[in-house]
Amino acid sequence: MNLSAARLALLGSRSSLGRLLGIGAGVALGVAAFLLLWGAGDGLADRVHRTGWLYTWGVEGPRPLTQGESLWALTTDYHEGDAIVRRDIAAGPGATATVPGVGALPEPGAYYASQAFADLVAKTPPAELGDRYGVFAGTLPPSVLSGPDALVVVKGSEPDAVARLDTANVITDLQEDAAQSSSSYRTIMLIGGIAVFFPVLLLVGIATSLGAAARAESFATLRLIGATPGALARLAAWEMGAVALAGGVLGTLLAWALRPVAALVPLGDGRLYAADLAVSPVTAALTVVAVAVIAAGAAAWRIHRTGVGPLGATRQRRERVPTAWRALPLVGGLAAMAAATLWTDALPDSAIQPLLLGGFGLTTAGIAIVGPWLTLCAGRLLERRARGAAGVIAGGRVRATPSATFRSVSGMVVAVFTVSVFAGAASSVDRITTPDTGPGLSPLNSVFAYIPDGAATPEALRAAASGAQRLVVAYGPPERDFVAVSAADARALGLPVPDGARFVRFNPMPFTEAAPEEPATTEPTPGLRGLDPAMAFALTDGTQTGQELARTALDTSGLTAGPALSRADLADLGLRGTIGNLAKLAYLGVFVAILIAGVSLAVSTAAAMLDRRRVLGLMRLMGMAPKVLRRVIAYETAVPLASVVLLSAAAGFGVAWLILEGLGKKEGLTMGAPDPVFFLTLGVGLALTAAATAAAASLVTGRTGLATTRFE
Amino acid sequence: MTENAIITARGLRKSFGPTEALRGVDLDVRRGEVLAVMGPSGSGKSTLLHCLAGVVVPDEGTVRVAGRDVTALDEAARSRLRLAEFGFVFQFGQLLPELTAADNVALPLLLAGTPRGRARTAAHAALARLDLAGAERRYPTELSGGQAQRVAIARALVTRPKVLFADEPTGSLDSLAAEHVLTAMLDLVREDGTTVVLITHDPRTAAHADREVIVRDGRIGASSGMVA
């Protein structure tokens, strides 16, 4: 077989080149998406390492510092809803642990800060923020921060001041792996990764099968003139391998070029640096080579499977009829996740993660696997019930080729599953982000702070918080298991006061939680004798400025055990938890997935119709109106979508519930109604499906004309 | 215009880019006549068929079918005309592989809005007329070449068209099967009084026609039988 002749036969026409360009573009898009996602995964891991020093936790609480030691306190401060990672540090003699990237510890009254924080201080009145920290001493470099938006401040203080803070502990060395990186967080990251990679893989798969029927005809011709099956397989492998290699290289360049744009998207705790999204040259090279090798192998296998005959006639292989057994992986995946959920207490953490991850992967794959069987059932139903030509044609096609038909919508089905998982999981976050209001809950216009045992007198506190409309001091025992206030103060705080009571006591925990199961209740108490100031509540005018002024006043009093908080801040703390990160990542991933799925649907629908353009052209010649053809395309898209999409959504919410039960039980998370973003995302998915179908119909209507009916 | 002509073509010209496929064709086809259009590859036979059937619009000239100017109709009206008045048979690849023989035959009726039950009954009857009773539920891949071609003929005739356009209908069959298929087709059309425009390379096929015309270089070069 002359290779030049073969090349001419395969590449000689404009449509052949167009097909190869289409494949190359599809592979490039897929590889670019893959590398960006991989880079984001690596970037998040790098971020954990970079910020490890911020989360280093000593082994001992406050005590007189000895040689080499320093005292660090880890708190979260707030400004107008933005969380500020704050470290208060007091250096002992010859402290060995220094701020990374700076090489020193801040002097008492001075602070180092991230550039984003320095910018925020510069544009905010000092009494609302800057006064809390002292004198700016220098900028923390990007190499020790999570990203360009990170609000981080490292404040120098005297040992006594730091020792008063609840979280103070003695440090000698900083740890790189101390960041908040729970196994739950990693599990969710991996689940998000799996969910997004599926549509990427489907896109690459669909792109490489473009124009399979037209290709089969070219191969049949080559067989007729003497090419052996092995030669054809090698030819197909080389052709596809070369195109995939070129597409992969292009995708790598595309990923590189798109990093600054991709870096604009917040991930977890904020944006990553563009450099974080870079993958190593080895990873990029391995990805490109792997894609090329897999594409080449798949092309050779496809030729082998097509069975091109020596008479130049290809015989369409009938698809193997899918059976109900295809539901097994889906059932197995859900069972694995259910096992991880039901036996959370009995199973070790090391077993829960693999069960959840494996279960999720199996469930996602299971939906793709069971799809053809459900499509077959729906196709049979359509074929039996069809009244018109479009229904008969589409029903017959769907029934005869359920796998090929389902492949067109598989990306969208997986995307619907994914969005349902994330919507279900995110619904628990929504419940936390909006703090409840009402009796027994601290007013939203107040900020509160705990007071170390014996640290402050009521007079000193009132003097410190002079900017607040009213300062309420609550008194409690050293254990802080309850606090007590006068009846007048209780009424000011919105607490119920029993008739005749002059003083009441209550549990401060539900009173200050964002969304407690039950609001705080009060009971009369004889008086405040024997109790010390335990908490301070500064009631403000409810404006952001008023809250920040009160916060700064309490903070600079030197009388509190940590930054002053509001219940809205605590709601935000909930959002920053494990599920919060999932929610933030979710819709980004889902958007990417749906976009890719929409492109895949358009490509595969058009490819499926173009593969049948001759016979459809004949139908049009017989008098079939274009609208019938469009109806056929709509049926062929709608039937598999309708048959599987409900199952996808239900499985998605089921999986979300299992994740929340398995990972969020300790956090008391429960599933609520889906966020409006869920319906918006589904709407975008449906709109993309309609647009893809319309685009395919338009393309096919134009390609089923006279030229396709000539036989000479 | 020939008396009793169902199709009248005058001055047909059609070019595809620089290639002139038809260079001024005049042709009349009588009602109930079987007309064979012969000629070498690239002579313009298929283009002539497409112009006569309203599949393409000629650059110049007119085509009248039963007195109606086809070239003046828009695509939708021509589609309706093809569906209602014409039948088509081609060389191969014309059956939808996912549909049974009966559903393939029923398709033109379904496209015309006939209820499915009645369309199926008519399809079964059409298949029976072509000796395919019992093959209704078989798929195209389960049929021989000759059987598949007879299914295609049944589909073309199931709407009782006024004109049947057949483009090399036996071109992919061996001579025995070709003879069998052609005889079956012509017996039916003569029984129904259907006009046939039959494009073929094969003189043996053309010999079954009432009249032959030969197309060369986009023109009607010669004819036998009645005068064109």
Image (spheres, coloured by chain):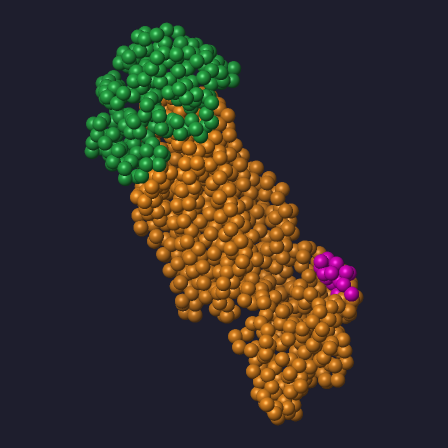
Foreground residue among A459 and A100? A459
Q: Quadrant of the N terminus of chain A?
A: top left
Q: Splitting the image into 4 quarters, where does residue B228 fall? A: top left
Range of residues picked out in magenta: A110-125
Q: Is residue A563 magenta?
A: no
Q: Position of residue A111 (x, y in %)?
A: 75, 65
Q: Is residue A116 magenta?
A: yes
Q: Residue shown at 74%/60% (left/top)?
A: A120
Foreground residue among A692 and A276? A692
Q: Position of residue A477 (x, y in %)?
A: 62, 86
For chain A, the rendered hue is orange
In this view, B210 is above or below A39 = above
Q: Position of residue A387 (x, y in %)?
A: 33, 41
Q: Residue shown at 47%/15% (left/top)?
A: B61
Q: Position of residue A599 (x, y in %)?
A: 51, 42
In this view, A250 is above or below A117 = above
Q: Residue shown at 49%/17% (left/top)?
A: B59
Q: Residue shown at 54%/64% (left/top)?
A: A429
Foreground residue among B130 and A593? B130
In this view, A350 is above or below B219 = below
For chain B, the rendered hue is green
Q: Splitting the image into 4 quarters, where does residue A615 fall? A: top left
Using residue A298 as the reference point, say whether residue A31 is left or right of it.
right
Q: Quadrant of the C terminus of chain A?
A: top left
